[in-house]
Every structure is written in structure tokens, then in C-alpha cells.
Image: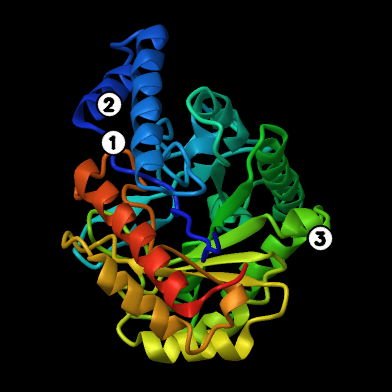
Amino acid sequence: MNLIPSESVGSVPRSRELQEAMAAFSQGNLPEREMNKYFDEAVKDTIHRMKNTGSPIISDGEQTKSSFVTYPLDGLTNLASDGISIPFEDGHTRQLPKLTKGPFHYSTYAGSYLPRAKKYTTLPLKQAVISASAMSLLYPSEGLADYTQQQFIIDLVNQSVADIRSCFDNGAHHVQVDFTEARLAIKLDPSKALLKQFIDLNNQVLSNFSYQERQRIGFHTCPGGDHDSTHSGDVDYAELIPLFLTLNSGNFYMQMASEKNPTKALKIIGENIQPNQKVYIGVIDVVNEAIETPQMVYERIMAAAEYIPLNQLGTTDDCGFSPFSDDMATSRDTAFAKITARIEGTKMAAEKLKFKA
């Protein structure tokens, strides 16, 4: 059967029971063995429900991550809480920690999440990791006396490479690098110098992988998605897309369903996509509670197919449904209903387009 490939971005909302258990564990009120029972049940249920949507590639829904961005930092003692603050359009903020001394290293590699997921499925697994560019924001603007920014970047690249490598070593079929700060970089620096710096850093990481491995690595971008709000939706996608597609990876997971002018963005993608790249277009709006119908998904794919070559087109969700573990804006039932609509709508479009992989 010929298919247009379709993959989730990452997170699925956690149950209230899991969130309460994670909070109790973080406060020292729940033993680790009990926490692991909650994690096992959450991953088992998530994978079962993901399989039931018909998804050809699945994930654990990031059930055991504290957040999509801070998982490498859990337990580190050389961090302060007063790092960069990122405001969202609804008024809430998320604050990153700040490095207080070197050397910098990850406490957790994302590949460590895969063995638990593999207990419950033999389907191909996708694993998300955080970008080196996001982690670069941990270095304080005032610098550190005994740890230069240059040495920090060397250590950061090595850690980011090890993070991705750990996923492959533990059986990941695809690895997705979350680069949600791409659009934000333009908001912070309209000259795009910061964005170019971020892309150069991420390409430095990619240079440590073979061409075949890079074809299994993808970059995800969106204007943020947290508590049904965004941090950079006001930035023109046209300012990002040409530079975004200069990343030396094979796959790109791009928010589109919630885009104000998707036709303009799709046209720019079509003008800049390279022969060895596949673009997974967001056909599910994760910050809107309304559940898409398969027909709506089908229509979004047909619009994308006007600009993107069929053998380079895939579908995805605009973002994860719950990138931070405390985000309860979307229910699990709604998330899985939306994923099901994506899979069914993608099949409808594939049949209409007579797609051949």
C-alpha cells in the first residue's frame, strides 16, 4: 500500500494521575519504584492508543519527560533558576535555567526513554531530542569566569551529538530535533543573525553524522505551543523558511495548520526545498480544541501538494500536544482523536494523489 508518511511531533497529554505522581516524586513524596509503575502504565497506554490510530511510526508521547526542553538538565547542580524568560501570547511565561559553572553535560540522554517504549511495541519508534541551539541559551550573557563560552559550545555540541547517537543506539527509527526557538530567534533579533548562529550550531552537530543517518534526523519548528498559546506566532514564516531548510537533515516537521497564510508559506517551501529533503506539513492545530475531520486534513494535504513534490511530502501535527508535563490544556482523548483524523485524512489524500513512495 502506498502511503504519504505521517508522524506525530512528540508529546501527548499526561493523565492527571501521572501528573500528580510526577509532582509527588519531585517533592520526595513518592518512591522511585512507585514512580516507575506510573511511567510504565502511562507509556503502555500511550503506545496502545497510538497504535490504534493506525500510526505507522509511533512514540511514547514523552510521558516520562519533565519537559521537551529540560529533560537533559534533571538533577544537575550547576544551574540557577533565573535564566531566559520566554513570554507567551496569553501572558504566561516559561523560564529556562542558567548555567553557573562548567563543565556542561547532560544528565539524561533521550535514548534512555526508548527501552521502556520497546517493551510495548515492535513498530518503528520515533524519539525527540532538544536542539543544541535551545541549550545554548543556558550560558549566561555575563559569562563565567572559569568556563568560556567557546568551551561551553564545544561541550554542548559533544553532548547534543551523544544525545542523538543514544537514540540510534537504542533503536530509534527517526530522531526529531525540537527547534521551536527558530521563529523566536527572529523575534528577538530581526536581523536574523541569532537565527543564523542557531542554524550554524545545529549544522555543526549534524556534521558528526553520516548522510544516511542525517536522512533519519529531522528538525521540528513551530511558534511554540503551551497551554494553547504561542510565543512567536506573530513572526512572518517567510522570514524563517528559506534559512530553516538550510539545515543539513533529511526531514522537516513544520507547523502549518494554525498558520495565518498557509498558501504563502507552502509556496516558499516549494521554492526552497532540496531534492534530499522531506517536509512533514502540520495538518493538526494543537492549540485549538476543535477536532479536525479527516476531510479537513485531506484538504490541507491537497493544498500542500500544489507546491511540494509528492515524494517529498509528509504530514504531522503542528507541535506536541503537551510539551511541558504540567500542560493540561488538551485532553488525552482529544489528542488521540486529532491524531486519528490525521492518519485517516492522510490515507484519503494518498489515495486521491495515487502517491508512490
Type of amino acid under label 2: Leu
Q: Is residue 311 above or below residue 61?
A: below
Circle 3 residue: 211
Look at 33% across and 19% down and name the residue there: 38
Label 1: element kind: loop
Q: Callout 3, which amino acid? A: Tyr
Q: Residue at x 64, y 75 (%)?
A: 196
> Residue 1 versus residue 77: which sits nearer the camera?
1
- Residue named by callout 1: 14
Q: Residue furthest left?
A: 290
Residue of label 2:
18
Which residue is at a point 55% across and 73% down the rendered structure image? 355
Q: Position of residue 174 (x, y in %)?
A: 62, 49
Residue 96 image position (x, y, % from top left): 43, 48
Which structural element holds mark 3?
Answer: helix
The answer to whether mark 3 and mark 1 are in CB contact below 8 A is: no
